[in-house]
Amino acid sequence: MPENAGPLVLVQFYLDCLSHASYLVGDRTTGRAVVVDPQRDVNDYLATAERHGLTVERVIETHIHADFLSGHLELAERTGARISYGSTATLDFDTDPLADGERLVLGEVELEILHTPGHTPESICVVVREHAGDAVPYGVLTGDTLFIGDVGRPDLLSSRGRSAEEMGRLLYRSTRALLALPDGTRVYPAHGAGSACGKNLSAELSCTIGTQRTGNYALADMTEDEFVAVVTDGQPAVPAYFAFTSVRNRQARPVLDEGTQVPALTPEALLQARAGGAIVLDTRDPEAFAAAHLHGAVNIPLGGRFAELAGQVLDAQDAIVLCGEPDTAAEARTRLARIGFDRVLGALAAPVDTVDAEYLTRAIRLDADALADRLADAAAEFTLLDVRGPGEVRDSGTVPGAHLIPLPELLARLGELPTGQPLTVICASGNRSSVAASVLRARGFDTTDLRGGFAAWHGEIARPADQAARPADQAVRAAGQAVQSSGHDVDGVTA
């Protein structure tokens, strides 16, 4: 984000692994600042504020988040800042609520609060003016109400008790109210591509009201009924941890201490923790995991959308012991803490292969041609499981005969899988399939997965039968293009 020469300081912070954007907004003339929608580990905000000569005096949450554990309590403890939500929010800790139309003056910089329910009942947006009274605001922080290319979904669990249709109608009115802002107003959302809080988010991290007015499908000229129909259709599966996190964000929970070291475990201590019920979470890449890992370990590669995937297949109450590449334990612990998974008991201090061989096993990963041979063998009895999201399958098709269960729904739908028959799992690139296969093996399923995922299948196995698995009215796309088009469903590759 380019440096602004006037009194306004506006800094965007972006977490690729959660597709989460947060903001520091301050006034150079007074040194007063707010942080909007912070992540749980808050050191970067404090360092940036100090670099700009700012003091954080308030934390503003645009809504009660479901996809990450917010850092409002951490910032309040570190700085004494007040915590503010929209005035309709119900919380278990003290806040300084913000009314619709309320203006906060930082100095020359002024913030205006707009109540914009729809994604959640208490959602707000924050209009930022560099000088009080500016006819054209500098920008608007839209939270999960308006994204670049999309709007917030109206069906998440943080809106429990309210139907998707009811929330969708509120969202229609809220987004149309945002269109009353001048076209030159910059739009700064809380999420980008990859977030499960919408279905068509752009990789762009800012835009203008004018560009969204003409380019965002959800802002097109349509009736309220049409809007509700289009924004509720085709939403991705809701990760299971959203229910936990949305509740936790309402509570006066313990704060994160970023300086605490992750306890180093000997192989014996790790095995003892596992025997006591702890989940062994192996954060290495799928190939290293397949070569040798502890029996029953779950593989979630740290290089991808680590915390989000963990939240899809683990429980927040699980005790966790980590094993992975050297010096990655602190990063893994922090990324788990960002979704409220705090029960990390420690991390194996030595490489996995130092554990006694009797506790180790291997995983089979099939290449595309081996899967093709298996499919062609009439005597082979196995179930093919595709854990990609519905958008990905719709856009690019799947391997013939695959049973479709999106990864976020896997644990709830285990009853659909045969227990006496081998399983082969596929995803887009071989990342989520390793996660799913490890989870299934830990539950007693005989499971392999496809190395390279559907991209490898589509790239190496050009078969007429594959065409039948695609929508008849769509042209065949390269797997890479399909991955890009599906947004929220893709395998993440950045930290």
Image (cartoon, rainbow, N blue to C red):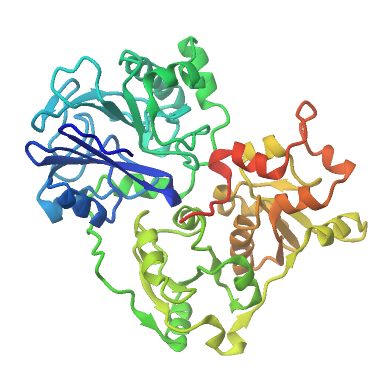
Residue 443 in view here: no
Which of 346 and 149 lies nearest the eye of the viewer? 149
Task: Give the quadrant of the C terminus.
Answer: bottom left
- Residue 366 rendering spot, x and y as whole percentages: 76, 64
Total label count? 0
Residue 369 in view here: yes
User: Residue 262 vs residue 432: left or right?
Assistant: left
Task: Give the quadrant of the N terminus.
Answer: top left
Which of 264 and 1 lies nearest the eye of the viewer? 1
The answer to whether 357 is drawn above or below residue 250 in the figure is below
User: Residue 77 vs residue 390: left or right?
Assistant: left
User: Residue 211 vs residue 199: left or right?
Assistant: left
- Residue 197 rendering spot, x and y as whole percentages: 44, 37
The residue located at (33%, 74%) in the rendering is: 262
Q: Residue furthest front?
A: 5
- Residue 336 rendering spot, x and y as whole percentages: 39, 60
The residue located at (45%, 17%) in the rendering is: 219
The residue located at (54%, 33%) in the rendering is: 235
The answer to whether 293 is drawn above or below residue 491 in the figure is below
The answer to whether 274 is drawn above or below residue 406 in the figure is below
Picture quadrant of residue 207: top left
User: Residue 2 vs residue 278: left or right?
Assistant: left
